[in-house]
Image (cartoon, rainbow, N blue to C red):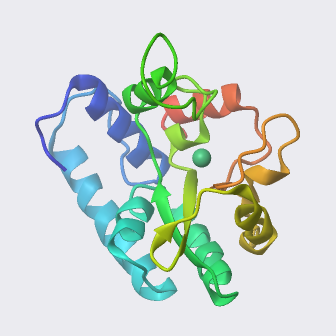
Amino acid sequence: MSKQLSKDDVLFRQRFLSCCGFYADTLDGLWGKNTDDAEAAFAARSAEIAQAEGTFDARTERTLFSLRCDAQAAARRSLAAIRAAGHDARAISGTRTYPEQQALYRQGRFGNPGPIVTKAQAGQSWHNFGLAWDIGLFNGGQYVTNDAPYVQVGPIGRTGGVEWGGDWKSFKDNPHYQFGTGGMAISAARAVFEAGGR
Ligand SMILES: [Zn+2]
């Protein structure tokens, strides 16, 4: 982790590491030894999970390492189940900081180019709390963009407590999976995250 981060970036990281159980110091946005130690402990635990559960392609690995530890293990099992059913599934998007979420929200809005890809502003997405990931399906190395294959694999990936965005009633998000949401409303989850899960 680079130390050339804004105070908001560091605070986000401290909240994330606290939720993972590796950071118990003040959530102050100041990078210190305890943040450094927490980052090292998180990296070590993540490596253990990867070794225990099995690893995938490089992009999937980067994506999964962005998740909270409990979600990492669940995501690896979900992806493995989909792949075992013969689909080339990869994790292509994981944790987003609040500024990253806001940039994504602006896509396709306010005169910005690109399609609208999210209805969630900063702090309104499970991706902002380290608990969600999106998959891409690939066919002969080509990224699959039509919905049907994502709908087909959704129930396969919905394993071991993993929730699938295709089950949502109002806004179906077929490539989306999440874990550990505990039946909470997103506003409640945001409060828990910002308190570092304490
Ligand atoms: Zn998603």
Q: Position of residue 88 (x, y in %)?
A: 55, 79
Could you say which is closer to the camera, residue 79 or residue 34? Answer: 79
In the picture, residue 44 is in which quadrant? bottom left
Could you say which is closer to the camera, residue 179 or residue 62? Answer: 62
Could you say which is closer to the camera, residue 155 or residue 147? Answer: 147
Q: Position of residue 40 (x, y in %)?
A: 24, 61
Q: Position of residue 135 (x, y in %)?
A: 56, 61
On screen, residue 194 above or below 94:
above
Residue found 58% across the figure and 63% down from its top: 144
Residue 103 left/right relative to 158: left
Could you say which is closer to the camera, residue 91 or residue 43? Answer: 91
Residue 146 left/right relative to 46: right
**Quadrant position of the C terminus in the picture:** top right
Residue found 85% across the figure and 34% down from its top: 170
Residue found 15% across the figure and 46% down from its top: 33
On screen, residue 54 above or below 164:
below
On screen, residue 119 above or below 94:
above
Q: Position of residue 158 (x, y in %)?
A: 76, 67
